Amino acid sequence: MSAAPRTRTRLFSAAKFTLGLALLILLVRWLAPDLSAVLRDIHLDLAALALAVLTHAVATAAVSLRWKLMVEAMGGTPLPYIIYFRAFALTKLVGNVTSSLAMDLIGRGVALRSAGSEQGLGLAMTQAVLERIFDVVLPLAMVAWALAVHHLQPSDAAAAASFLLIGLAIGGLSALVLWPLTRVALRLYFWARAWRRPGALAAPAPATPPISRGLAAQVGMLGVLRYVAVLACYITIAWALGAALAPTPIAAAMPIGQLAALIGVTPGALGIQEAGWAGALRFLGVTDAAAIALFVVGVRLLSALFFLFHYLVTWPLERARAAGGDPPADRR
């Protein structure tokens, strides 16, 4: 890429980041014109903050393991788990200032190739698209759950039980859907590859799904674990900052926040995800605007810091692996 297109790309990225930041600032000012009220609400709880870091690490670990299982089942080069964990943390961190969609579809594949993977970027993108499909299905199901909770007003125990039942149902659905969907996706990938580069296809598309039903069930359950761990992280972030938000409204608003995060207009859906959170919480009857403002800003900042923390704290493990001269093979 020449200097001029590279400069235009950087300016465009900076403009999108500026837009997202402006949207976030306008949202916070709309929610809490008196910013001093937001600052007065901050009561840092270090124990809750430590729990937020832990639940965020669980969510990151679950996504990384799901990524590894899917990539290697679809023919990717086996790599140590720590590579997936650190690559996911890094791409999510960079996605906050560039493009989360580009990081998911391209950045992850580039990260694996730099670690020794021989998998093409096209196959990496195919896996990422499949992963995104299931990351949309669960929040969509939870939107229906949130509306039911809002209108029926069940007890906290009943709301929690129904939440877990829906999550388990979606995880079970993965066992039925993911394995044939993977076969279709791979056939489309091989067809597109052969069309773009005639003669480059060295082997035919697999006749049987590379992801068995058992593995598909594992992938589905890891997706549910990720969702529950992220929810726990959001709740503990609210506790850590002193934001007066109960767990049930956070759980009910989360699917809108998750779906809004998939809108890649701004880097990491900056400003858009926060608007989704704020709109959902207000719809659910939360009237403490200062608490909402504190929560959405806190989630944005702390989530980025947590990814940075995970990446840095695992650096000694990666250094030890590299010093040991591990080949590109899984050595759990």
Image: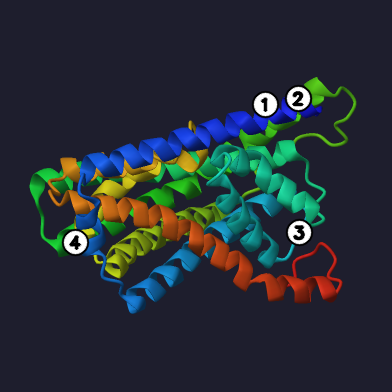
Foreground: disc 2 or disc 4: 2
Foreground: disc 2 or disc 3: 2
Residue drawn at point x = 70 percent, y = 62 percent: 83
* Distance from the alpha carbon under mark 2 to that under mark 3: 39 Å
- Residue 48 percent across, percent down from the top left: 33, 74
- The residue singled out by tag 1 in the image is 8
- Residue 73 percent across, percent down from the top left: 68, 52
Q: Amino acid at mark 4?
A: Ala
- 160 to the left or right of 113: left
Foreground: disc 3 or disc 4: 4
Residue drawn at point x = 20 percent, y = 52 percent: 290
Q: Secondary structure at mark 3?
A: loop
Q: Quadrant of residue 26?
A: top left
Give yes or no for contact between labels 2 and 4 (Cβ–Cβ under 8 Å). no
Foreground: disc 1 or disc 4: 1
Which mark, by number, is residue 206? none
Sequence order check: which comes first, mark 1 or mark 4? 1
Mark 2, residues whose alpha carbon is within 10 Å: few (<14), some, or many (≥20)? few
Q: Is residue 221 above or below residue 286?
A: below
Q: Amino acid at mark 3?
A: Pro
Give yes or no for contact between labels 2 and 1 (Cβ–Cβ under 8 Å). yes
* Distance from the alpha carbon under mark 2 to that under mark 1: 6 Å
Front in this rendered view, residue 115 or 14: 14
Which mark, by number, is residue 4? 2
Q: Quadrant of residue 263?
A: top left
Front in this rendered view, residue 58 or 332: 58
* Distance from the alpha carbon under mark 1 to that under mark 4: 43 Å
Which mark, by number, is residue 244? 4
Residue drawn at point x = 79 percent, y = 20 percent: 195
- The residue singled out by tag 3 in the image is 78
Mark 4, residues whose alpha carbon is within 10 Å: few (<14), some, or many (≥20)? some
